[in-house]
Amino acid sequence: MHGTALLRCLLTISLMNQVSGLETLTSKYGDTIEIPCNKGQLKETDVKFVKWKYDEDGNILVKQQNQNASIHADVNYKNRVSIKKDFSLVITQVTMVDQRTFTCMAVGKEDILEYPVQLTIYKAPSQPEITNLTTAMAVGKPTMLAQCSTEGASPAANITWFKNKTPLVTDGAAIKINTNLDVDKETRLSTTTSTLEYTAVKGDFDAKFTCQVQHIWSANMDSSPLVFSVNYPTEKVTLQVVSQGPFKEGDSVILKCTADGNPPPSSFNFYIDGEKNSVDSNTYTLTNVSREDTGDYKCSLVDNEDIAASVTITVEYLDVVLGTTGKIVKKLGESLEVTVDVKASGVAETTWKKGNVKLNSLPKFDKLTYSDSGMYECVVSMAGFKETRTFELVVEGPPAIKNLIKEHGDNMAKVLKCVAEGSPKPTVQWSVNGTSDESRYEHGKVTYSITIIPKDNLTVSCTASNVLGSDIKSINVSALDEDVAMDKQADQKDEYSDQTALAVGIVVGLTLAVLAIGLAYWLYMKKFRQGSWKIGEKEDGSAEESKKLEENQSQKADV
């Protein structure tokens, strides 16, 4: 009988007893119970004796007035019963055997009264125990997952299965629950066993199953969660690139093939350059890849090549060839063509620098100068790649003295400066001795200076030379300050000359302007006179007025 049904039956019996006036007592299995006679209201002076019995004819003991109780030799009670002063029956260590009706029969002076009492025994069940546990479920296939049992209960316990805290109910298809109830013949205690058969779906891979024992005299007791592996065939494979890109030539690329089945396959086919390679692994490594390895790669199941996946791998490359490399030596004034050839798998960007200065475009040298000398750097970059090429340009030329000047130094000292141009750097030889100095050599130009205190008038020579040739210039130097005075006179002379030239230019300009105005006026008057004569011929007028007009015009012309 199912535990719940038995419990309902016992409750029904108890209710019937209450309706019929039968007193009912409940005791826990193994406890001591005291059963009163007439609810403890019977007095010793009112009776001659009291007899306790069970069921119809099971005698337990007799207690006569003013005498000790006489206990019958009943194997069930002779060592477990006693009677109190108020005639209550005491039973120790109650068991399921004691779940019966006990009757107190009181014999008075005039009549005999009976007081029956129904005793009910309860016992809480044990913790749930899981047996016959499986490890895996197959999708779409009924699987006996586990058996849950509890024992030693009265009344019988109930067992309910849960999945993710939701109770499972037999539906005859995906869920089948079989429950058995056994009662021990000796102890009369119940054992409840429940078996769960379940048909899994893919979503059950992380489902938690529990078995719960339910009893009227105890709190619900849950088993530990049960988690099962869910097995299902592979329907789809995925091929992925494990290595981190972008990939350049010489790299190793790891491919990984995964399947959605459980358990996953241990072997796969990898297709490399159209050739099938079966490996006992889910990875395949491409070593030392090159640009020719760019393309599609594929993997499939060994036992079903129709279930496959593919991925595209791109091996990036960046080739840079600079037409001019190393150290380039050119002559002053020559031309130089710089070329760079870039081959790339993507969009590449090229930048140029001379030293630390960024250039706007590819260097172009139509006519080389000393300032063109330097270290040039070409940087070609693409996503994840960078290539650098350099060349050194050296522009050479023989020395040329661009200027030789003299300046007034402290006191009587004279400072001579010789500006020389050339490459390699020119050296300077002075024709006199003095304190020498030189500037920084930059863009093929350097300034050498010498400080002297001449005692006599002399001519000083500056000779600049390098491996390609030499140049010489001389300057006259006076022992006095007249060099500076002569320079000032020359400056004044130049100033006067400039002023005279300016005055002459103004006079000439004014004269030309007057002549132009006069010529224009003469042409105007000539045209006017011709027009006046024509009017006189056509119209009536006095000759005298015409003459006056002519005289006035002559006067204006004279003015």
Image (cartoon, rainbow, N blue to C red):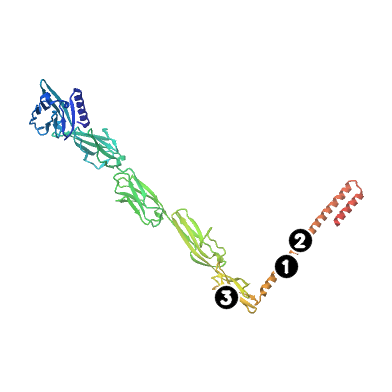
Q: Is residue 150 left or right of residue 513?
A: left
Q: Is residue 448 left or right of residue 539?
A: left
Tag 1: residue type? Tyr
Between tags 1 and 2, which lies in front?
1
- The residue at the point 13 percent across, 22 percent down is 113
How much space separates mark 1 and mark 2, taking CA atoms?
A: 20 Å
| Residue closest to the eye, 490 or 305 | 490
Query: Image quadrant of residue 226?
Result: top left
Q: Position of residue 267 (x, y in %)?
A: 30, 49
Label 1 residue SS: helix
The residue carrying mark 2 is 509
Q: Position of residue 183 (x, y in %)?
A: 16, 33
Going from N to C along the chain, the mark reached first, 1 or 2, is 1
Where's the C terminus, which quadrant? bottom right
Q: Position of residue 419 (x, y in %)?
A: 59, 70
Q: Residues within 10 Å of mark 3 (few under 14, many from 20)?
A: few
Going from N to C along the chain, the mark reached first, 1 or 3, is 3
The residue carrying mark 3 is 435
Looking at this view, name the residue that lies furthest to the bottom: 456
Between tags 3 and 2, which lies in front?
3
Tag 3: residue type? Thr
Q: Is residue 108 left or right of residue 198?
A: left
The residue carrying mark 1 is 496
Is residue 551 positioned above or below 197 on the image?
below
Looking at this view, name the residue that lies furthest to the top: 110
Numbered tag placed on residue 266 in the rendering: none
Whether residue 422 is visible here, answered yes or no, is: yes
Q: Is residue 366 left or right of residue 479?
A: left
How much space separates mark 1 and mark 3, taking CA atoms?
A: 38 Å
Query: Image quadrant of residue 492?
Result: bottom right
Is residue 261 positioned above or below 475 on the image?
above
How much space separates mark 3 and mark 2, taking CA atoms?
A: 55 Å
